[in-house]
Structure formats: structure tokens, C-alpha cells
Image (cartoon, coloured by chain):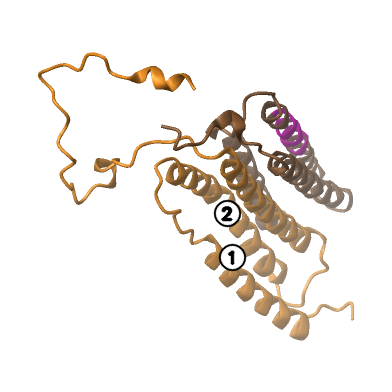
């Protein structure tokens, strides 16, 4: 039952563009977080731990950006209005963010600058 | 749509229409009677953006906590920076963990035409950020470090 809706007729309009921009901002947030860690590594010990965490976060930011771009391409595929996110699309973002937070917590707890 | 081809031309005679759902009270899984529909993609996109907004909130809190613990000058109170920074980071982790479940519950609610579930995250954020702000204010006022 499609409850009177024609899925092909639904114009997602600017909603998909807003979603694309939201992905971009999320990637930028991760990159900003990585830059902060990388900045911290320049001034304090232990350099190696900070470098590892900072570079990892930067890579995660890039991956998030790529994931968002890939999602945007799926959404914009013609004739298929319902290419919405699946759990497997979003779970890595949540897990990655949680992992970054755990690393940040450990860094703050054990290696305060 | 091709789903209209589901018209049952030959129902098995031994099973007439199933009885209309005795109201199994306790388990919510036992009453999935509202039929499953594909949500409007615009609503799914909005749900996805809400998830991403929570993720950015988490990242902002984590980044703020990192700045406090790693880049701030020390307070006069030992552990003062951790007192501010670590709760922010912990809150960020909490949000990151629960935002995915919230997205999923919202998606399911739309799919089965239930009311959208409530989230406790906004209240937690308000409480933790308020407490941390007060602690930070006290620290800055009374233990503001030797920098002056």
C-alpha cells in the first residue's frame, strides 16, 4: 500500500541537497577536531600518541566526507526517489565519533598537556 | 507500482482471514499491526540530517573538551581543566552512541506509523552543559591561573 502516494512523483526537492550539506558539515567537524589534536601534538608530549590520534581523526573526517558524497550520488540517481540512508550507512559515523570521543577522553585523562 | 500484483488469487481455504489481533498487552513486538509503509523520503532525509546534527554536536563537545584539556593554560586548582573538559567529552561519546539508536527508532516509527519516540538527549545536554558552564565560571573567577 502506498497510501495514495506515488513514490516516483515525490520530488525530494531541496531536501536531498540539505542532507548533502549536512554531511559536508559533519566531515568538516571531524576535520576541525583532528586539527585541534594535531595542533596539540606540536606543543606537548607524548608526541606519538597525539600524532596517531590526530591523523586518525583527520582520516575519519575525509572518510565521512567521502561517505556523504557517495550518499548524495545515491540520492540523486534519477527515477529512484527513495534512496534513503540505511543503517550501514550511518553506523560507521556513530561508531567513529564515539571512538574519537573515547580516544579524546583517554588523552585528556592520561596525557594532559 | 508493481506491488499491486500481490492480489491473492488463491487463498488457502484452511486459513480464512486471521482474527483481528488479540491485544497482547505486555510486549510491544507482539502488536506490529499497523502495516509497514515506505516512509516519505523527505522525512527520512530529515531524520538523517537530525542524526548528523547530533553527530556534529557530539564532535563539537569532544573538540571543546580537547581544547580545554590540551590547549588551555592550567588553573590554580589541580585537575581543573579535566573537571571541565572530560564531562564534555563524555557527553559527546554518549550522544554519538545514542544518536544512532534514535535515528533507527524514528525510522521505524515512521515506517510503522507510530508516534515519534521521545529522546532524553536534549535534557542531558542541557543539564551537563549548564553544570559545566557553572563549574567553568567558578574556576575562571577563583582559580584563574597565574597568567592574569
Q: Colour of chain A?
A: brown
Question: Residue B79 sits in which quadrant?
Answer: bottom right
x and y, in percent, of residue A26 in the image: 73, 45
Kindly identify which numbered label has been placed on residue B95: 2
Look at the image and tell me whether residue A83 can be seen.
no
Q: Is residue B34 in sight in this rendering?
A: yes
User: For mark 1, what is the residue?
Assistant: B125
Which color is chain B depicted in? orange
Q: Magenta region, mostly helix, strand or loop?
A: helix
Q: Which residue is more in the foreground, B118 or B39?
A: B39
The tag earlier along the polypeptide, 2 or 1, is 2
Residue A66 lies in the magenta-colored region: yes
Q: Which residues are magenta?
A: A61-70
Task: Check contact, mark 2 vs mark 1: CB within 8 A.
Answer: yes
Q: Is residue A109 above or below residue A56?
A: below
Identify the mark at residue A76; answer none if there is no mark. Answer: none
Q: CA distance from mark 2 to mark 1?
A: 9 Å
| Along the viewing direction, whichever of B122 and A107 lies nearer the viewer | B122
Q: Give the quadrant of the C terminus of chain A.
A: bottom right
Question: Residue B100's quadrant in the figure?
Answer: top right
Relative vertical location of residue B110 with respect to residue B54 in this rendering, above or below = above
In depth, the one of B146 and B86 nearer the eye is B86
Q: Is residue A20 left or right of residue B106?
A: right
Q: Please, is residue A113 above or below residue B30 in the view?
A: below
Which of the image's four quarters has the N terminus of chain A? top left
Mark 2 is surrounded, within 10 Å at the Cα level, by few (under 14), some (14 to 19) or many (20 or more) other residues, namely: many
Secondary element at tag 1? helix
- As helix, strand or loop, the secondary structure at mark 2 comes to helix
Q: Chain of mark 1?
A: B
Q: Which residue shows up at 24% across the image and 41% down it?
A: B30
Q: Is residue B13 magenta?
A: no
Question: Can you give x and y, in whole percent of width and height, for residue A15 in the image?
Answer: 69, 43
Amino acid at each position: 500500500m502506498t497510501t495514495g502516494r506515488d513514490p516516483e512523483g515525490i520530488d525530494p526537492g531541496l531536501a536531498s541537497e540539505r542532507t548533502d550539506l549536512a554531511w559536508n558539515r559533519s566531515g568538516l567537524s571531524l576535520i576541525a577536531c583532528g586539527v585541534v589534536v594535531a595542533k596539540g601534538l606540536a606543543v606537548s608530549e607524548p608526541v606519538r600518541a597525539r600524532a596517531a590520534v590526530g591523523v586518525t581523526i583527520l582520516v575519519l573526517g575525509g572518510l565521512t566526507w567521502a561517505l556523504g558524497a557517495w550518499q548524495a550520488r545515491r540520492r540523486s540517481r534519477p527515477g529512484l526517489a527513495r534512496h534513503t540512508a540505511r543503517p550501514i550507512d550511518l553506523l560507521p559515523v556513530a561508531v567513529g565519533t564515539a571512538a574519537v570521543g573515547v580516544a579524546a577522553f583517554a588523552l585528556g585523562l592520561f596525557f594532559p598537556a | 507500482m508493481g506491488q499491486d500484483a500481490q492480489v491473492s488469487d488463491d487463498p488457502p481455504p484452511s486459513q480464512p482471514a486471521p482474527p483481528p489481533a488479540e491485544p497482547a498487552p505486555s510486549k510491544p513486538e507482539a502488536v506490529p499491526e499497523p502495516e509497514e509503509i515506505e516512509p516519505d523520503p523527505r522525512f527520512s532525509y530529515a531524520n538523517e540530517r537530525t542524526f548528523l546534527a547530533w553527530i556534529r554536536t557530539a564532535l563539537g563537545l569532544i573538540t571543546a573538551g580537547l581544547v580545554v584539556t590540551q590547549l588551555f593554560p592550567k588553573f590554580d586548582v589541580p585537575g581543573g581543566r579535566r573537571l571541565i573538559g572530560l564531562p564534555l567529552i563524555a557527553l559527546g561519546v554518549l550522544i554519538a552512541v545514542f544518536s544512532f539508536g534514535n535515528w533507527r527508532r524514528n525510522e521505524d516509527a515512521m515506517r510503522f506509523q507510530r508516534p515519534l519516540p521521545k529522546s532524553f538527549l536534549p535534557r542531558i545536554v542541557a543539564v551537563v552543559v549548564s553544570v559545566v558552564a557553572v563549574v567553568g565560571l567558578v574556576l575562571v573567577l577563583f582559580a584563574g591561573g597565574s597568567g592574569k
